[in-house]
Amino acid sequence: MSNIVAIVGRPNVGKSTLYNRLTESRKAIVDDLSGVTRDRHYGLAEWTNRTFTVVDTGGYVANSEDLFETAIREQVLIAIEEATVILFIADVTTGPTDLDDSIADMLRRSNKPVFVVANKVDNNQLLSETHIFYSFGLGDIYPISSMTGSGTGELLDEVVKHFPEDVPEGSNLPKYAIVGRPNVGKSSLINALTGQDRNIVTPIAGTTRDSIHIHYNQYGHEFMLIDTAGLRKKTKVKENIEFYSVMRTIKALEEADVTILMIDAVEGIESQDINIFHLAEKNKKGVVILVNKWDMIEKNHKTTKVFEEQIKQKISPFTDVPIVFTSVTEKQRIFKAIEAASKVYENKTKKIPTSKVNEVMLPIIESYPPPSLKGKYVKIKYITQLNGSSPIFAFFCNLPQYIKEPYKRFLENKLREHFDFSGVPIQIYFRQK
Ligand code: GDP
Ligand code: GDP
C-alpha cells in the first residue's frame, strides 16, 4: 500500500525546507546510509510508526519563465491524481497570491485530502494572520514554521489519519515492479514478457485502481508485474514527464516485493537511478538491476565487469545486488532477469532456522569479536531471524549499545556470505540479553 504525500505550492513558500524537515527527521532516527544522493525531491518519512514518501514538487519546475505557471499547474494536477495526501503550502508573510488562488481552485475540484499549510509562522503574532487563507475554501489551516519545525507534528498527526490501513492486497503472488527512467525499455520489457501469448495477460480485478497489475504465469514462474510504463500521460512541460514518472515509480515500488530497476546501458547509471535504488533499499524491497540496451554497447571480455564495478561503486554500500545485462529488443537474457527477480523474492522471504544461524555465526563472532569499547567487552550470545516481510536478525548480547557500525556491517557481510541474501536489504538489531 503506498502513501505519497505531495508538497505543492508556488516557489519560495518553503516547500523544500519542509521536505527536508520531514525526511531529515526520519534520517536522524533510523537512517544508516552514508553518501545520500543530492538533488533528491522524494524520500521516506516516518510519523507515529507510519512510513510514507514525501515528494517536493518544486524540484521539477521548468526553468523558462513562460512555461512556469503552466508547469506548476500541471504538477498540481499530477499530484492530485497520484498522491494520497496533498500539502498545499502558502506563505503567511506574503498572504495569498493569484497563483495561490489558481492552485486552490484546482485543489478544491479534487477528491484528494488537501491540507492548507500556512508556512513561516515563526511567532505568535503571525499566527493571527493565518486566517486569511480560509479564502482558499479548503477548510482548516495548519500553521507551521518549516524553519523551526513548530506545528509540523500537529499537521502530521492529521495527515497520517488519511492513509489507508495496511490491508493485504488481493493476491498472494510475488509482486515485481518494473521501474526506471523514461525510455529505458520498461514497456518493451512488459511486451516481451506478455506479448507472445496474450492469454497470459489477465489484469486482476479489485487490485489498486491506479497501477496496472499483470498476472504472469509461464515457464514455472508465477507473479504479478506492476507496470509504471503503461499509463503514460501527455504533459506540456518536459520536466513534468519526469515528475510524473517519479510519482508512478514511488507508488509501484511501495507496492512491490521486488523492484526491477532498469537502467540504460548507453547513458549509464544516473542520479535518478541511484535515488530509486536507495528508495527501494530504504523501503526494504528486493532489487534487481537490469542494464538494458546492452546490444548498443561495444563489448570486449572486460565490459560487463567494468559496468558492474561502476554500478556497485555508485550504489554502495548495498552492493550485493544481481545485475543482469539485457537487450529487450534482441530478447537477450529476459528470462534470466525474471529468474533473478524470483531468486531475490525467495531470498527476501526465506527464514533461516535459528540453529543454523547460530551454528554459522557464533564461531565467526568468537574468532572475531566486537572490539572492546571503554574497556567493556560485548558478548553476543545468540542470534535469531525475526519474522518480517524482509530479513531481520536480532543479535542478543550483554551491551547492545557498544556495538558500532563497522562491526554491524561485518556481521551483515558474513550473513550474506553464508546465506544467499542477494538483492535484499538486511536489518540487524542488537538486543539486550
Ligand atoms: P520552495 O521554493 O517552496 O521550495 O521554498 P524554500 O524551501 O526554498 O524556501 C524559500 C525561502 O523561505 C528560503 O529562504 C527559506 O529559508 C525560507 N523559509 C522556509 N521556511 C521558512 C519558515 O518557516 N520561516 C521563515 N522565516 N522562512 C522560511
Ligand atoms: P519506457 O519509456 O521505459 O517504457 O521505454 P520503451 O519500452 O518505450 O522503450 C524506449 C525505446 O527504447 C523504444 O524505442 C524501444 O524500442 C527502445 N528499446 C527498448 N529496449 C531496447 C534494447 O534492449 N535495445 C535497444 N537498442 N533499444 C531498446
Image (spheres, rainbow, N blue to C red):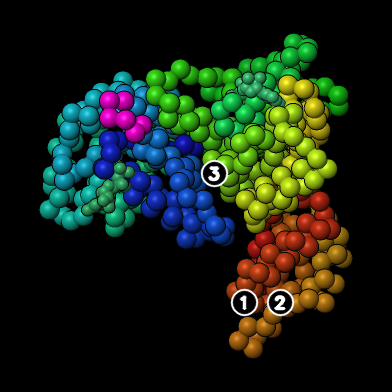
Res 370 label: 2
Res 150 → quadrant: bottom left
Q: CA distance from mark 2 to mark 3?
A: 35 Å
Q: Is residue 196 visible?
A: yes
Res 383 → quadrant: bottom right
Q: Is residue 179 left or right of residue 122?
A: right
Residue at x 64%, y 73% (from the top left corner): 403
Q: CA distance from mark 1 to mark 3?
A: 35 Å
Q: Quadrant of the N terminus?
A: top right
Nearer mark to the viewer, of 2 and 3: 3
The residue tagged 3 is 271
Instruction: Please tell me whether residue 431 is drawn above or below residue 421 in the rendered image.
Output: below
The amino acid pointed to by label 1 is Tyr
Residue at x 65%, y 63% (from the top left corner): 429
Residue at x 61%, y 36% (from the top left corner): 267
**Foreground residue, 166 or 428?**
428
Of marks 2 and 3, which one's residue comes earlier in the chain?
3
Of marks 1 and 2, which one's residue comes earlier in the chain?
2
Q: Is residue 430 left or right of residue 240?
A: right
Q: What stretch of residues is rendered in magenta? A: 62-67
Q: Is residue 166 visible?
A: no
**SS under mark 2:** loop
**SS under mark 3:** helix
Is mark 1 in CB contact (under 8 Å) with mark 2?
A: yes
Q: Is residue 272 left or right of residue 388?
A: left
Nearer mark to the viewer, of 1 and 3: 3
The amino acid pointed to by label 3 is Ser
